[in-house]
Image (cartoon, grey):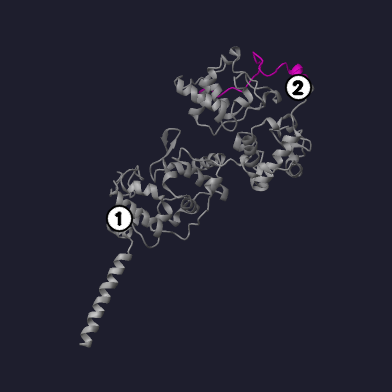
Amino acid sequence: MRKLLLSNLLILICIFSAKISVASTDPGKVLAEKKCASCHRFVGEAKSRFDIKAPDLMWGGNKYQVSWLKNFLQGNEQPLYLKNYRWDQTRKPQKHLVISKAEAHSIANYFSKSLMDSRVKKGALDLSLFTQMEATLGEQIFKEHSCSACHQINDDGKLVGGQQSTSFVNAGKRYNVDWVYRFNSHPPDYAPHSGEFVADVSQEGLRFVTGYIMTLGVDDFKFYEPWKDKFFKSTSAKRGKQTYKEYCSQCHGATGKGDGPAASSLKPKPAIHANIAFDKEPEDYLYNIVFYGGKAVGKSPFMPYWGLTLKPQGVADVIAYMKKTFKGPSLQAKSEQVAKDSDQPGLCPQLRKTPQAPGDIINVKNPLESNKKNIRKGKLYFTQKAKPLACKHCHGLKGDGKGAKAFNMIPPPRNFTCASTMNNITDGQMFWVIKNGSPNTEMQAYKNMKDKQIWQMILYIRELL
């Protein structure tokens, strides 16, 4: 009898333990093993694309945003691969399994709780501190390092780039930033011998390109604006003066006259700060040129990027010093210059020779239709959104060449309302000057603007006559 009781007790314990085991198993895991494991791996080390059926998902919780994954599993997102993942077997895109809403939510939640990778560091890149200029620099890196050869992106409404790997059209809504940062650090860690490319970029470059990828498809991405942060609320012109002496004066001179000891060997010459009314310069423009350097805003590449050296507070301080110290030429100096040059802001016609665009560009006509939408967009760029600096600051809100900066510029900006000048400037010439800048003038290059945006601005400028 005693043996029978023990036997029955053991049976009850086994049954009870089995029930606990089943109850404690994540239903999302059960579904993933049932629905996904025939193609995807959830454990083990990374393998080559040519040894597996579909992407590894051991780190799926780090990789994908939960909201995107839920939609994708229900068939509500665009395909990830415009060609098949195993392009060595077929080039036709393969349809992904579609499951119910409840199943998708269960699997996505399982991913976020369990499929994590210890190599991915939380907070590796804080997107709340990512600026628009950094996104622009990241886009340059993305294109210069051939990322667009494999990954398709939406470039100003047009799909461009290769289709060999994952589409990046909506990458910012799909991936988690910390995973992208870790993947970009060394892609073969996640896809060995699979054609993944290791780019030769610095830590800052890695930050820029990762942040840029995270803006793709995110129309309402909120960029950080350092000039509105605490650094600019606690500036010290006194500290800025010392910074200017230690770093800026070697090129721009002790009194901002562009006559520092390094200036003699530079061409183009350093900016003459004494001729600039810094208190009238846009705060974001000043920050970008000091923090990210002249090249970033279409100015001289000899102007270094001082952000890593001075840090945000040092940049804010030196800007405060320049605003306090440099007010532009005196009224007497301005009047003497006008009398000497007979070339004052707004003059019509403007007798000036500008380098001519190449023969294959100069006679190009604006490819865009002159309609209300394009003209409205052009006006928005001209008055607000053109980068590195909105056109109105120099050319004036009315385009008459009398912007706030114009009276300190030699020669002064173009007067776009002067028909006798503008009728002799072709669309191609204007496009080339905007894109590349104009030597020996204050007109910087707008290389980072899309071609379409520049053509829209030209349409608007033509309306100013």
Q: Residue 367: x percent and y percent?
A: 45, 22
Q: Residue 22: x percent and y percent?
A: 29, 66
Q: Amino acid at mark 1?
A: Cys
Instruction: Kindly identify the residue that appears in the image at 62 percent across and 43 percent down.
Output: 229
Residue 362 seen in render: no
Of helix, strand and loop, which one carries label 2? helix
Q: Which residue is mark 1?
A: 36
Q: Which residue is mark 2?
A: 334
| Magenta region | 334-360
Q: Which mark is residue 164?
A: none
Could you tell me what secondary structure mostly forms the magenta stretch?
loop
Instruction: Kindly identify the residue that appears in the image at 51 percent across and 24 percent down.
Output: 378
Of helix, strand and loop, which one carries label 1? loop
17 part of magenta stretch? no
Q: Residue 436: x percent and y percent?
A: 58, 29
> Is residue 309 shown left or right of residue 84?
right
From the viewer's side, name the closer residue of 111 and 332.
111
From the viewer's side, name the closer residue of 415 and 145.
415
Q: Amino acid at mark 2?
A: Lys
